[in-house]
Image: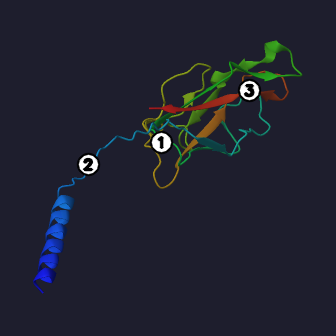
Amino acid sequence: MTKLKMLLAGFLAVLILFLQAGDAVTNNTSSTSATASISETISVTLSGGPINFANLMPGSDNNSADSSLNITIDQVTNVATNITQKGNATFECSACDPVDNFSISNLRYSDNSTLTNAVNMTDTDSAPPFSNWTNIPKPTNSSQDREAHYWLSIPSGQTAGSYQTDIYVNVSKY
């Protein structure tokens, strides 16, 4: 039995030595960084257009458009924004003499359905004309909606015809 005890004691010594050697192994953890670059995104939907005016009389002022234009800053937009508008320099009639064209400044627009703070349309870029059109927060749970209402004054003696111009709605980063 002593041989067996000695054999067992030797086995235990090897096992203890093995366990102590295993305890001496250390973990080596390293780290790295991860980066992501998110592009600025502005997405806009216009609805309610085109901007139409019924049959207008020469010399009539501030004729209201048939409907407003809805400007929706979509939920994928990830920056604060401003809204501005401009138009071509003139309303043009393709069947009329070019001398009959009239200025874009005859078109007024507002952020509400009254003329109280309406501004004349221009053909140049300008600052946002209304406080709720500047620094519009980025959409979070839903889109950001704004309206534009339009009025058109027709010069006295204006030649009959169908006149057209382009309106540009610009939504840019604040």
**Callout 2 secondary element:** loop
Q: Is residue 7 visible?
A: yes
Q: Residues within 10 Å of mark 1 (few under 14, many from 20)?
A: some
**How far, Cα to Cα, is label 1 from label 3?**
32 Å
**How far, Cα to Cα, is label 2 from label 1?**
40 Å
Label 2: which residue?
Answer: 28
| Residue found at x 13% / y 81% | 3
Placement of 143 over or under 156, stated as above or below: below
Q: Earlier in the sequence, mark 2 or mark 1?
A: 2
> Which amino acid type is marked by label 1?
Asn
Snapshot colouring: rainbow
- On screen, residue 158 versus residue 46, left or right, reads right
Of the pair 94 and 29, the residue shown nearer to us? 29
> Which amino acid type is marked by label 3?
Thr
Which label is found at residue 78? 1
- On screen, residue 160 versus residue 66, left or right, reads right
- On screen, residue 132 versus residue 71, left or right, reads left
Label 3: which residue?
Answer: 165
**Callout 1 secondary element:** loop
